[in-house]
Image (cartoon, rainbow, N blue to C red):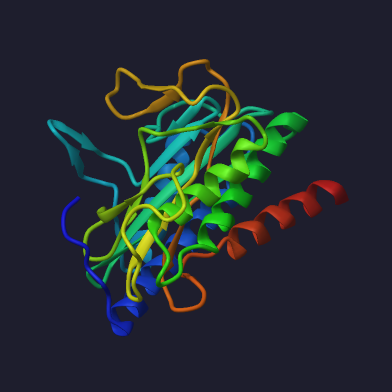
Amino acid sequence: MGKIYLKTDEEIELIRESCLLVSKTIAEVGKNIREGVSTIALDKIAEEFIRDNGATPAFKGYRKERLVFDYTLCVSVNEQVVHGVPNNYVLKNSDIVSVDCGVLKNGFYGDSAYTFSVGEISEEVKQLLKVTKESLYKGIENAVAGKRVGDISSAVEEHVSKYGYGIVRELVGHGIGRSLHEAPEVPNYGKRGSGIKMEEGLVIAIEPMINLGRRDVKTERDGWTVSTIDKKPSAHFEHTVAVKKNKAEVLTTFEFIEKEIKTKIETVTNE
């Protein structure tokens, strides 16, 4: 990934603006996640929302060798871990859906992901989602100036390992700023005290990708979608955070998303 770029307070404010829009976009998508909706329909909702708010979808046009990603969201269903390509798949009861979104605004990127459930899901999958989200916050607690990236990685691993889940190793978190992917890499496994020492101004995306079963993954024939080898479900939660002296500052938020989820639950309960 190359050089690490530390951001000024002014640059962090611009990243925060992109992160706020990312958070609101995922919430808008979440409002529309239900049985009978296709993943390509969710992608269209996200693109319109981002452009209506004066920004550009960060993933659209992303290149990997000869491949070009032509969508706003990565929508990964059930055993798909990340980078799922939106298509005509129609969501059904008991699916889980990971929505990963990036935005470019005022020259800076924001990035976040959230795994939603569709209708009723099993208790073991509920626990997978809960533990994966918890592991994200365990990592964030360690994104503090003076600590090392390995402190984030080991915090995620230590929490997840208690449940016997598989931690994806082929994909990692990353620095973010004027580029969508900057140094350093932020793995979800590792040793405390290892890796680069973090400084104030470092902005990183922390994103545990956790499998219910084995950690092994494969890339599907579309060249993008990464799935579990054993076909068991996978969860993905991501925040963009700024490293500070005493406590990390979370620039994205799940507040809008979880407000929409709560509203949907209350609506169903009252019907």
Residue at the spot x=71%, y=38% of the render?
127
User: Residue 105 at x, y = what percent?
Assistant: 29, 68
Residue 3, quarter of the rendered image: bottom left
Tell me the quarter of the picture where residue 27 sits.
bottom right
Q: Position of residue 34 (x, y in %)?
A: 63, 39
x then y, percent, for residue 79: 52, 25
Q: Furthest residue to the front? A: 193
The answer to which of 120 and 54 lies nearer the viewer is 120
For image coordinates 39% across by 28% down, the residue present is: 226
> 11 or 17: which is nearer to us?
11
Residue nearer the viewer, 236 or 42: 236
x 40%, y 32%: residue: 84
Task: Name the residue nearer the viewer: 14 or 154.
Answer: 154
- Give the farthest residue toward the bottom: 10
Asked if 224 appears above or below 60 in the picture, the reply is above
Q: Of all residues shown, which one is farthest toward the left?
A: 66
Say whether residue 6 is visible. yes
Task: Measuring from the top left, give residue 60's x and y in whole percent.
Answer: 26, 46
Rendered view: 72 above or below 38: below
